[in-house]
Image (cartoon, grey):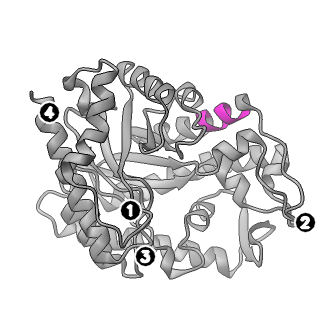
Amino acid sequence: MPESQVTATALGPWPGEDALEATRIIRGELGSPHLPFLVELPDRGVGSDALGRTASLLVDLSVDVQPYGWRIVDRPGKDLMRAKSALSTDINILADVAGTEDSPAGDFKVQVRGPLSLAAGLHLHNGERALLDYGARRDIAESLAAGVGDFLARIRTAVPGARLVVQVDEPDIAAVLAGTIPTSSGYRTLRAVPGREVTESWRLVIDAIRAAGAAETVIAVAEIEAPFERILAAGADGIAVPLKALTSRQWEQLAGAVEAGKSLWAGVLPAGHPAASLPRVQEAVESVWRPWRQLGLPASSLGSIRVTPSEGLSGHTPSSATAVLVRLTQVADGLNQLALG
């Protein structure tokens, strides 16, 4: 649910292969009231990518890696074991770092790939995307819903007393709904998934996350054709979206969500070009404050916002990724000053 003040977080992916260094940086820069998160280090390779990590949580579904990507298989193999091992390592490191802190409790976030983007990224035995098959889509959503409980229980053990937040990533959702995901051959596209099924899949996963004790669930999407209404209908507590290309209509939808008590995770800092200079604090603050005022939202409701980068930070260096976190906390401070009037 919305916080009483603007806070900062990032979306999960981080550069390099050193989970200990990354965890220390993230927890150092995003201390209370901000939102530290379980690091994702895709540079480590197979199993540390977002898709492989979430696939390792699935119950009664095993995966392995083929030249075309992750595939659903009958029995677990070395690729799945590698993904599970990497996740266990990261959770153990989190516990070690949190255990040295004076007050390790507070908010803490984990990320999972959402059921539709997971189905778009996983392949069936014949090499075709699981998204093609209704039964496979249903099985993946149910398996993910079954797996999040154990995942969150492990996180709760690592950071006792933390208020858990779950970010459900759906990077492919616009293409899933539009029917523009290519088949494995690339010569055709897969039929659009009905919107009602998307909402139901999200609701299934969100309900499981909530039942596992998470305090907040946010669905993260790209801004183009973002299905905000479906996200809210599924029961999400908020929406994470980059701000740069939002239309006036989308801002109006987000304003309605804020007025209904939902949170907005605002992607205020472009992160796709690590060598580029970060926007000045005032520039980033204005990217939120200007449309906020135009929509007639009060300054006092700015506490509904968490500021984030526009995307993950794995393409950065550790130092430039750290600079992004620092700038985000500065932007949060700037917005909080406006909220206080």
Q: Which residue is drawn at 15% across and 43% down?
A: 334
Q: Are marks 2 and 3 in contact (CB under 8 Å)?
A: no
Q: Which residue is drawn at 22% across and 54% down?
A: 280
Residue 41 visible, this orientation? yes
Q: How far apart are marks 1 and 3 (CA)?
A: 11 Å
Is residue 200 rendered magenta in the image? yes
Q: Which amino acid does label 1 sit on?
A: Leu
The residue pinned by badge 3 equals: 89
Q: What element carries label 4?
A: helix
Q: Give the range drawn in magenta.
A: 197-203
Q: What element carries label 1?
A: loop
The residue pinned by badge 2 equals: 126
Q: Which of marks 2 and 3 is in front?
A: 2
Residue 17 on image: x %, y %? 42, 82
Q: What element carries label 2?
A: loop
Quarter of the view holding residue 289: top left
First in sequence: mark 2 or mark 4?
Answer: 2
First in sequence: mark 4 or mark 1?
Answer: 1
First in sequence: mark 3 or mark 4?
Answer: 3
First in sequence: mark 1 or mark 3?
Answer: 1
The residue pinned by badge 4 equals: 338
The residue pinned by badge 1 equals: 38
Relative placement, left or right, of 215 versus 203 is left
Q: Which amino acid does label 2 sit on?
A: Asn
Q: Which amino acid does label 4 sit on?
A: Leu
